[in-house]
Amino acid sequence: MASRYQFAEIETKWQQRWREARLFQTPEPGERPKFYYLDMFPYPSGELHMGHMRNYIIGDVLARFKVMTGHAVLHPMGWDAFGLPAENAAIERGIHPYDWTMACIKRMREQFESLGISYDWEREVNTCLPEYYKWDQWFFLKMYERGLAYKKQAPVNWCPKCQTVLANEQVVGTACERCDTPVVKRNLEQWFLRITDYAERLLQDLALLEGWPERVRLMQQNWIGRSEGATLIFEVEGTGEPIECFTTRPDTLFGATFLALAPEHPMTLALVAGTPQEAEVRAFVERSARVSEISRASAETPKEGIFLGRYAINPVNGERIPIWTADYVLMEYGSGAIMCVPAHDERDFAFARKYGIPVRVVIQPKGGNLDGETMTEAYVGPGFQVNSGPFDGLPNDEGAEAITRFLEDKGKGRHDVRYRLRDWCISRQRYWGTPIPIIYCESCGTVPVPESDLPVTLPREVEFRPRGVSPLATAEEFVNCKCPKCGGPAKRDTDTMDTFVESSWYFLRFVSPHVNDKPFDPEAVERWMPVDQYVGGIEHATMHLLYARFFVKVLKDMGMVGFEEPFRSLFTQGMIYKDGAKMSKSKGNVVSPDEINSRFGADTGRLFILFAGPPEQDTEWSDEGVAGCSRFLGRTFRLVADNKGLLVADWRDRLNPEEQDPLVRDLRRKTHQTVRKVTEDIGKRMHFNTAVSAMMELVNTMSDFAAALQQAPTTAKAAAFSEAVESLILLLAPFCPHLADELWEMTGHEGFTYQQDWPTYDPDLAAESEIVVVVQVDGRVRDRLRLPATADTRTIRDRALASGRVIHALGGKRPRRVIVVGKRLVNIVR
Ligand code: ANZ
Ligand code: ZN
């Protein structure tokens, strides 16, 4: 009777046994090398999707592999539990965000368990609980003490109809996602973390991250966006008021034919105050305030501006140039004012042609003949200074230096470095987040909540429907408090923190999740950090990964951790597509992990995800592929179940390295080669798909072998087959742990595969088989060469000619002909 692979029973049985044995509890590292494996923790939406599944299964294979190869592994999971969707669910379904979140967590934890993932649930971290977010608040206060948290006015998206602030995700195009009303910008006082203080370190230390994909490091580098140049000081004609302009091209200073201020620049309105232009300029400023910065700065958007009727003095030659305001100048970058050189900057060129401003060439390419009157686009390449007074003739890079130095001496400029990176705005006008631990007192001003009063607990009963203010502002009992300094009546900050704050340090919490007098235990951090392998989506390449690096650097400066970088290696998995598109509910092409689980079992789902393609690449979902994986596991199950009677427990003692039976030699070679391949594919390359193919090949070889064994059993065959079966089960264990444990038990073993040593291979046994090639010189056998079976004709020929005996037989003559016959014979004719 053929045996059947009853995956549902098997999976439930082993999940329960693992749970009862507390199998995945994190050990103390002790003597063993530690390995901290971290998955990006999910937002508890209530539903695991395929993208999650791929992420977490990749991690589970690695974590299990590391355990079996002798590491003490930390493999935790938790919940990034604050955020907008919980609030929306509350508004739409009338469920409290807390209850909704906790129900989602419960359901997702079950999903994780039904996939057989080896998390240590005793270390679960949930960011929406006060025991966690208390430390967000504590970190905030520490940053505040160090001057790294500060408040300033900053624009938010505002829907005039809903009377509420919208998160960027709630703005569709330029309209409110709920009511389609065009969104406007509104200025609010908000809290910022001074990540820009760390820009240079965040940039420099990218070099330490050898285990990160080049692509991600580049994305961070661009995000930080370091520009080197100079800040030059122009003066307003008449008043002498300075206007600072940041430029990357001080070499082009003689070509500056106008100066442009951002509409929001404080001098824009000041310069026209009381003049006839004032009303027009004011309208312009208001209009551009509504347009997003991205579209204002884009090369495609037509540039708008107004001449302010005033002039500035060029610091290098005293020339008088008009001052404009222009929408393509952003207040948030550099100094919000620029010197404009139409001949050598595309945007300045478009603007100058539109408004009839002169274009003056000051950099000529070698042998060039550019003319400002006739040129049709800016020249942005290198060249030599022209029309630049004493600097004429210099190559422009030297010109840049010389002009900067010249102005430095006159106190009119300085060498300067600017970053695209902005300070991190963490205020959110939302309910479902960490309250900002700040109190406002009429007499004492801004007062931080004393550490001993933490956590500032998020109140449960709050009206979170849009009201035009932060939801917390409606909770009187929360808002009104006593000033910690003077005891007088005071009010709390009613914003909550960006959820990226929680995810900036959760990996530190996992090492000691239950300490309650500090955010983490420094000794545990010392033992486990940094994370050895971090795996997640490429969408976190900049914000999350940069914020986490920033937090750790701040903690380093506070003396709380001893390292600069939290994540030694990073892996970003590709997406899973269905029918050529990203899986999404609206497209109706979602395959849920639950569905695969119930139809084929978790092990099949796991295997398919790993087999579908290289994990860093996008992959297409294939029902065919799933069915194929399911058949493979069925075949594997039957192979073991139907032949278990032939297995011998003491196979190690019965195997003879000198064994001559070619069938036995071939099987052992295949076994050892597969062990080598799977070990290297997982451990060195994360090429799970090729590891799975190798196991499939092994199963094919074993099936043929089993037939031969049944027909003519010998001790040697039984031992070799037993070795193959045991190795296969252990190799399969990280991929399909339920089936592996079932087969492990079925073949008479104790315990779990998770606790076994990873199989090792013997390189000699794994070596390709050899061939013996006979070499004749003029018809007489002169040598027999042992070569790898893979040797090609050319190799065989070269090796034959290199043989000492052949050289001797040739007696110093060059052979006239060399004929290689198959892989057996080489005929050399003198
Ligand atoms: C004069 C100039 C001449 C410039 C030239 C470029 C070419 P990156 O590399 O991105 O740092 N700029 C400076 N601040 C700006 C702001 N707030 N809004 C819009 N543009 C701004 O670019 C720096 C260059 O972008 C600066 O160098 C400045 O234009 C412009 F042939 O100054 B340049
Ligand atoms: Zn006070």
Image (spheres, rainbow, N blue to C red):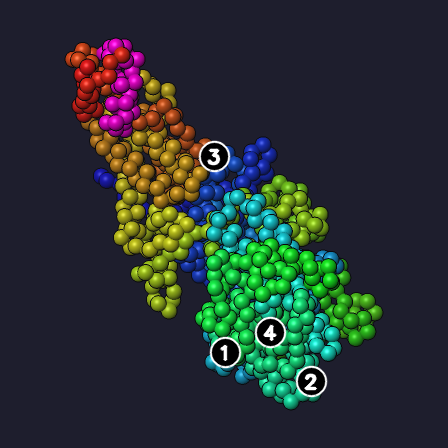
From the viewer's perspective, is the residue at label 4 or at label 3 nearer? 4
| Few, some or many residues within 10 Å of mark 1 (<14, 14–19, 20+) | few
Which residue is located at x 51 percent, y 53 percent? Answer: 218
Is residue 788 covered in magenta?
yes
Gap between marks 3 and 2 measured at Cα? 74 Å
**What residue is rendered at 63% in x and 53% in y?**
200
Give amino acid for label 1.
Lys
Between disc 3 and disc 1, whose residue precedes? 3
- Which residue lies most toward the bottom here? 276
**Would you say the beta carbon of the disc 3 residue lies within 8 angstroms of ligand 1?**
no
Residue 258, labelled with which disc? 4
Q: Within 8 Å of ligand 1, the CB of disc 4?
A: no
Question: Residue 750: percent from the left, percent from the top?
Answer: 43, 33
Q: How far apart are marks 4 and 2 (CA)?
A: 20 Å
Q: Position of residue 695 (x, y in %)?
A: 33, 38
Left or right: 475, with 114 as reference point:
right
Dot 3: within a 10 Å radius of its alpha carbon, few (fewer than 14), some, or many (20 or more) residues? Answer: some
Mark 3–mark 1 CB contact (< 8 Å): no
Q: Give the range drawn in magenta.
A: 782-811
CA–CA distance between discs 4 and 1? 13 Å
Q: Is mark 4 on a helix, strand or loop?
A: strand
Badge 2 is on which residue? 273
* Label 1 CB less than 8 angstroms from ligand 1: no
Q: Can residue 501 be seen in this view?
A: no
- In front of the other: label 3 or label 1? 1
